[in-house]
Image (tube, rainbow, N blue to C red):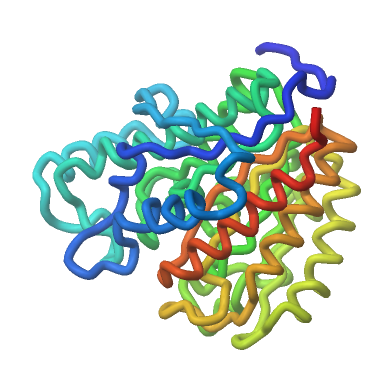
Amino acid sequence: MVATSNKTSDTNRVLVVRDAATAAYGFADGHPFSPDRHDAFHAALAISDLADSVEYGRGRMADREELTSFHTERYVDFVAAQCRLGSGMLDGGDTPAARGLFEATANVVGATLNMVDALMSGAARRAFVPIGGLHHAGRDHAAGFCVFNDCGIAAEILRRKYGLQRIAYVDIDAHHGDGMFYAYEEDPELFIADIHEDGRALFPGTGHALETGKGAAAGTKLNIPLRPRSGDDRFMLAWGQVEEFLEQARPEFILFQCGADSIVGDPLTHLEFTPAAHAHAARRLCELADSVCAGRVLGMGGGGYNLDNVARGWLAVVRSFTEDTPKA
């Protein structure tokens, strides 16, 4: 494994993925996870005052070795075969197979890994992948619109390629990041903090406060379920717990799943955050990262099924990335 240092990167660039191949990830025929989410965000970014403050990155097809760093060989083969067929479901009913979907989801993974490489090399200080954050996919199954779990693959590559040991995964999507939590429930060096809508009211029905890790990993996981209609005041109280948790963890890299479906008005969820919650989380993560891990924060867009919320929530994250990146 390659040793790394916590030396501050030589550049203060913020990279944002803008790529037609990753934009293609989504589902047709009125499915909530439509392929127009990427373009809705980028249309808003293009006319914002942030357009000149970021640079743009691209995706690529993740290779089989990268995909199987997290997923099983059998599952990768199943997705490939089902997508060639172009029909049927990849899970119990939320995630349909389609021709081209294998390539699209592999490109999302590749985009996330390209941003990992940029952050680890010092080519950028922060990065954002709009269509990343596919946190429901498990090692051997699809779930909740997620085929390949780019978050988990990123964690594995950070370990295998760069030799990192302490990685933090922070998730403020309205849905519990079950694909990440249960993959690493017994892993003491993957620190998970997840604020989400109470699973008794929402898919996937997991993420109870008592779920804090098992065995050697006990205490390395933090689940904070919030009642439906919880707003920014409840979020800020929960976020205080997240900060305490992360300060003790002292991670070497921060993966940030910032799903916009926790913003008020999402058609599938019942939380009532505003983009100010996303901005606050991003800003505070940047401050922590600057003190412990050379500023390395990778944002991933996650869920969000109201296109206006997607644009506003993700812009708030990118704004915090730019404002809290020291200027050269």
Residue 213 visible: no
Where residue 205 sits: x, y (%)?
A: 51, 74
Residue 34 in the figure: left or right of residue 46: left
In which quadrant will I find the C terminus?
Answer: top right
Q: Quadrant of residue 41?
A: bottom left
| x and y percentages locating residue 154 in the rendered image | 55, 34
| Residue in the picture at 28% in, 64% down | 92
- Among all residues in the image, which is located at the extreme top? 2
Q: Compared to 225, does 256 lie above or below?
A: above
At x 20% / y 60%, what residue is drawn? Answer: 28
**Does residue 273 show up?**
yes
Q: Which image quarter is the N terminus in?
A: top right
Where does the image place residue 86, in percent across and percent down from the top left?
A: 11, 48
Q: Is residue 266 above or below residue 56?
A: below
Q: Is 253 left, or right, of 102 in this rendering?
A: right
- Residues 290 and 192: in front is 290
Q: How many numbered discs?
A: 0
What residue is rendered at 30% in x and 55% in y?
A: 35
- Residue that appears at 39% across and 36% down: 72
Near-viewer residue (323 or 248): 323
Does 288 appear above or below 143? above
Q: Position of residue 318 (x, y in %)?
A: 63, 50
> Which residue appears farthest toward the bottom when viewing the image?
229
